[in-house]
Amino acid sequence: MTGLAPIDGLVVLAILAKAIDYGAALLAIGGVLFSIIFSQRAEASVLRLARQLAVGAALVGLAVLAVRFGIRAARISGMGLDGAIDPMMLGFVWESPLGTAAIWRGMGELAILTVLIPRIGRWIALAGSLAVAISFAQVGHSLGAPRAPLAILLALHLLAAAFWVGALLPLHRAARTPAGGDLLHYFGNAAAFGVAVLIVAGVALAWLLAGSAAALWGTAYGAALLAKVGLVSALLGLAALNKVRLVPAFRVGSPSATTALRRSISIEMLAVVLILLATATLTTVTTPPVNL
Amino acid sequence: MIKQTLLGLAVTVIPMLAAAHSKSEATTPANGATVSDVSELSMRFDDPMRIISVTLISPDGNIDIERETGMDPATEFRAMPVEALEPGSYRFDWRGMASDGHPMQGSFSFTVAE
């Protein structure tokens, strides 16, 4: 197995914090997208939940961003946890691309808080969502060549993932009452387009970073990426089941469909958590084959 | 399952030059080499690397070394042992940060013969 960095306690901590950072960013962006895209179709309580979700996730995102600075300072310092508060180490992290990414992500997440302000607020929050998506292209291997395609593909991949992930909780709420049937159906159609963007951008990114399909075998990057793809496939299977079977049954008022649909959405959320952990592992301890 | 996979990955990996961002890394002394004396310890990277902490370890403990390269990112790092190295085995450990922000670490080992 090549291209795997040593793993110690701080690295595990870094992976967990990064997964939370990813999750918070996706929920914050997704909550904003949901409240804009479905503003005419979703009930007021569902829209309120989406906005609250965006704000809560943005606050968690801001807090975990600060924690990640400390963890990274500790990792580079060689001093263990003491390095997390060492001004010089924190300065090095601030000067690094993570500092640039943190400015974009932090400003974006602050802007997302305005989603609670009627009318104008959601457009500021939408601009914030774009800033958060762009922030991910300011750090790590997306800085490599070709820079522009990598950045655009990554931002699109994240926006599509956020649209899906951020919708799960509001849809779970909507599936409580029969009135949510139309929203679920409409989401299924929009998501089919979103999933296409997600997959095309994801495959293109993997292609640029791996260089060849053969490079996926025998490399740590390949193993982690294949684990992620396996989890995403399971999630897509569930989503397809919802769209083709459960949502239509729910719309005609089948009593068992409500429970089945809500359970299926809950399992989707669990799959998302596992995917984020796999992604955080991928981006923390493995090296893309093109850089080996 | 992920946990097991991770654990498996961690176990199967031998301690290595984890300098993922620096494919043409070369060290003096070379990794695994047996040398008669060590006038300098150096590493080359193909991309500037900010080397933050360095340690030279012998079976008797840490050995004092003097850095010639500071903490600014550089493609070549140099340090000197403060005193001539006694015969024995040594390991040089380093930590730092690559120009894309990734924390990096690595090590190389060598033997000083009589």
Image (cartoon, coloured by chain):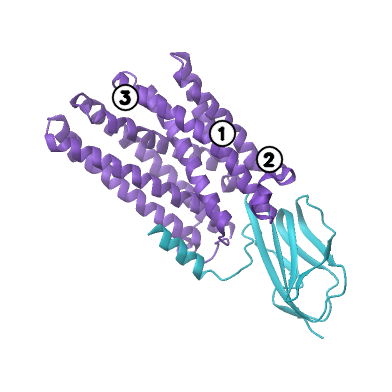
Q: Residue at x 53, y 69 (%)?
A: B13
Mark 1 chain: A
Position in image of residue A290 (x %, y %) = 56, 56
The residue that disc 3 covers is A46
Tag 2: residue type?
Trp
First in sequence: mark 1 vs mark 2: 2
Q: Residue at x 82, y 56 (%)?
A: B69
Shown colour of chain A:
purple
Tag 1: residue type?
Arg
For residue A142, the mark is none
Q: Are marks 1 and 2 in contact (CB under 8 Å)?
A: no
For residue A94, the mark is 2
From this view, report whether residue A214 is shown above or below residue B90.
above
The part of the image, by quadrant, that contains residue A263 is: top left
Q: Quadrant of the N terminus of chain B?
A: bottom left
Q: CA distance from mark 3 to mark 2?
A: 39 Å
User: Is disc 3 surrounded by few (<14), some (14 to 19) or many (20+) residues within 10 Å?
Assistant: many
Mark 3 chain: A
Q: Can residue A152 be spotted in the picture?
A: yes
For residue A105, the mark is 1
Q: Residue at x 36, y 26 (%)?
A: A49
